[in-house]
């Protein structure tokens, strides 16, 4: 996988994956994620995301672990980004809570 993304590009990808956990990306979630990047960069990252399977998304997130999450602060930054996505539509569902727990264990 391409490992030369900036943190903003990586976090947009990871946030797209987190937003898709409940089978759809709500408009509020997508709007939050789009704020991270200019339109062209967002569309490029979204296209990569849409081509990836769940396993490829998880592997990409784990591949970036060494680059952006070497310490507790880096992990917490990404986990906070996930939480913002989960709360963007003003619903923090049981599936999203479980995924947050899984992300905490995974990272």
Image (cartoon, rainbow, N blue to C red):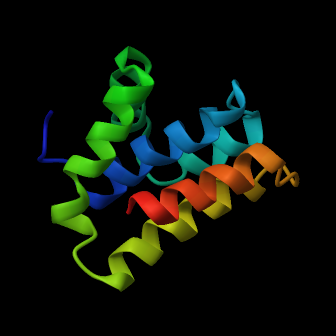
Establish if 83 lies above or below 38: below
Residue 7 image offset from top left, x and y in percent: 29, 60
Please state the horizontal and vertical placement of residue 40, each as a whole percent of the image. Answer: 36, 32
Q: Judge by depth and name the residue closer to the eye, 65 or 9.
A: 65
Image check: 69 left or right of 87? left
In this picture, is 41 found above or below 62? above
- Image position, residue 8 (x, y; %): 35, 56
Question: Does residue 38 lie above or below 23 as drawn?
Answer: below
Q: Quadrant of the C terminus?
A: bottom left
The x and y percentages for residue 75 are 39, 72
Which residue is outermost to the right? 90
Q: Is residue 1 visible?
A: yes
Position of 35 compared to 88: left or right?
left
Q: Residue at x 57, y 44 (%)?
A: 18
Residue lying at 36% horizontally and 21% vertically, measured from the top left? 52
Residue 34 showing in the rendered view: no
Left or right of residue 91, residue 6 in this image: left
Q: How many marks?
A: 0
Give 1 or 31, whichever is nearer the viewer.
1
The N terminus: image quadrant: top left
Q: Please tell me in which quadrant of the rendered image residue 71 appears.
A: bottom left
Q: Nearer the viewer, residue 22 or 10?
A: 22
* Residue at position x 54%, y 63% in the image: 81
């Amino acid at each position: 996988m391409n490992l030369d993304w900036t943190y903003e590009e990586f976090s947009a990808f990871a946030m797209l994956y987190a937003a898709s956990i409940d089978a759809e990306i709500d408009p509020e979630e997508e709007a939050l994620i789009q704020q991270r990047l200019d339109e062209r960069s967002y569309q490029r990252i979204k296209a990569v995301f849409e081509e990836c399977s769940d396993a490829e998304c998880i592997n990409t997130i784990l591949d970036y672990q060494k680059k952006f999450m070497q310490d507790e602060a880096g992990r917490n930054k990404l986990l906070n980004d996930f939480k913002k996505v989960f709360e963007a539509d003003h619903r923090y569902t049981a599936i999203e809570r479980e995924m947050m727990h899984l992300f905490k264990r995974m990272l």
